[in-house]
Image (spheres, helix red, strand yellow):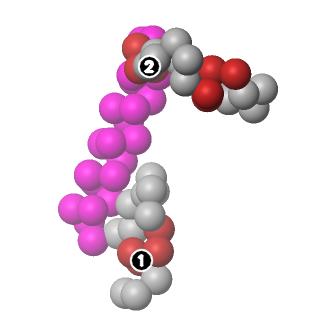
Amino acid sequence: MDKNNPLLDMENVCVLPHIGSATEETREKMAMMAAQNIVAALRGEQMPQVINPEVYESL
């Protein structure tokens, strides 16, 4: 990110490097969420972690 990016001057913005999610605890939770989604999908159930839940509205 350019050092003059206006986002860096905003009080309501927190800018973190992508590596910010690289803790062992966070990665374990991410893996569990992915596994829960896979199991639900294979069972034909609604996945618990969905970015766009509106996809289930048309079913």
In this view, 6 is above or below 34: above
In this view, 50 is above or below 3: below
Tag 2 or tag 1, which sits nearer the N-term? 2
Residue placed under numbered mark 1 in the picture: 56
Q: Is residue 54 left or right of residue 34?
A: right
Q: Main secondary structure of the magenta part?
A: helix
Q: Secondary structure beneath disc 1?
A: helix
Q: Is residue 42 left or right of residue 1?
A: left
Query: Which corner quadrant holds the N terminus?
Result: top left
In the image, residue 44 lies at what x, y percent?
27, 71
Q: Is residue 27 left or right of residue 43?
A: right
In the image, residue 58 lies at what x, y percent?
40, 87
Q: Is residue 2 visible?
A: yes
Q: Amino acid at mark 2?
A: Met
Query: Which corner quadrant holds the C terminus?
Result: bottom left
User: Can you tell which quarter of the image residue 23 is in?
Assistant: top left
Q: Which mark is residue 4?
A: none
Asked whether 7 or 51 is in front, the reply is 7
* Residue for point 75% across, 32% down: 12
37 magenta-colored: yes
Q: Secondary structure beneath disc 2?
A: loop
